[in-house]
Image: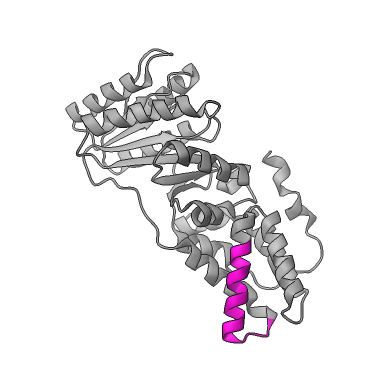
Amino acid sequence: MGVFSKIKAGLKKTKDSMVKKMQRVVNSFTKIDEELFEQLEETMIMSDMGVETSVEICAQLRKVIKERGIKDPSVIMELIQEIVADMMGEDIQLNLSSKPAVIMVIGVNGAGKTTTIGKMCHQFINEGKKVVVAAADTFRAAAIDQLQVWTERSGADIIKHEEGSDPASVVFDAVSAAKARNADVLICDTAGRLHNKKNLMDELAKMNRIIDREAAESSKEILLVLDATTGQNAVNQARLFKEVAPITGIVLTKLDGTAKGGIVISIKNELDIPVKLIGVGEKIDDLQPFDSRDFVRALFENAGTVDNKNNDEADDEETDDE
């Protein structure tokens, strides 16, 4: 299956829920009026696109329709696709320009941090890169053990200490190892706790200082891993983490298992943090670089005409995700 086909398949639940509901709203109107805008806005909000982003899309839609003198509701979905594409802007890929390139991975426990790191290791090594992983989530023995399994499977090197060790000391040793072994990429796992913002901030700041000092010439990515199935809660997590770390990109996991893929749009619009990688399946190669053009095209492609009857299956799709 090609990359676009994977993204399209991964967005099926979101398309069936959000886009088809929007299409049904449009199909129920024979003229463009305020009630149409209100129903569209409500549908977007209920589809986890977020209040701020939904309001902005509809405001842009009103403006475009007025400027172009559009009277026919049938072109509205095409206009929304145009507005969303413009809102997503240009893509920013991972910066791996130095050697070693440093990638710090942050996020709450359960979002898919460890799996994301494992998949990145697999992909980088398949590209011929040498990878070192710092097991700096020392507060969970399971995190270290899981990383060990992933690194052994992929062929990456792992630097680990005992459970409860100082995470910054693991990062220090990992930077030294990455330089000594002429590694191309150093990936640092971190603890996923949000219950004490000050401790988290101090811990991340300490690791950042060590990387800045010991790998001053390295490019650095700070990737926040978010679980797409949590919808607007993921956006709220991003807001909190943005307060404690200079996030350079988002990894959005489990996009294939949710109808809440609209949060990709609200993350970009409300937080101005680029989504750099997306998870569209459980296989090791299902972590893909994010392409906003493919995302928008897959979401709106052949939106076409849908029946105006209730789509109970689409409405209930989230029951398996909670």
Which residue is rendered at x = 54% and y = 35% of the image? 111
Q: Main secondary structure of the magenta part?
A: helix
Pinpoint residue 101: horizontal percent, then vertical percent: 27, 39
The vertical placement of 115 against 236, above or below, is above
Which residue is rendered at x = 50% and y = 45% of the image? 252
Q: Which quadrant: the C terminus?
A: top right
Q: Does the magenta stretch include residue 61?
A: yes
Q: Which colour scheme is used?
A: one colour
Considering every residue shown, the one lying at the far right of the view is: 309
Q: Give the range drawn in magenta.
A: 55-72
Pinpoint residue 267: horizontal percent, then vertical percent: 52, 51
Which residue is rendered at x = 63% and y = 59% of the image? 15
Left or right of 14 on screen, residue 31:
right
Left or right of 249 on screen, residue 5:
right
Q: In the figure, residue 299 lies in which quadrant?
A: bottom right
Residue 302 shows up from this direction: no
Pinpoint residue 293: horizontal percent, then vertical percent: 46, 64
The vertical placement of 309 against 241, above or below, is below
Q: In the figure, residue 159 lies in which quadrant?
A: top left
The vertical placement of 217 against 289, above or below, is above
Which residue is rendered at x = 68% and y = 84% of the image? 72
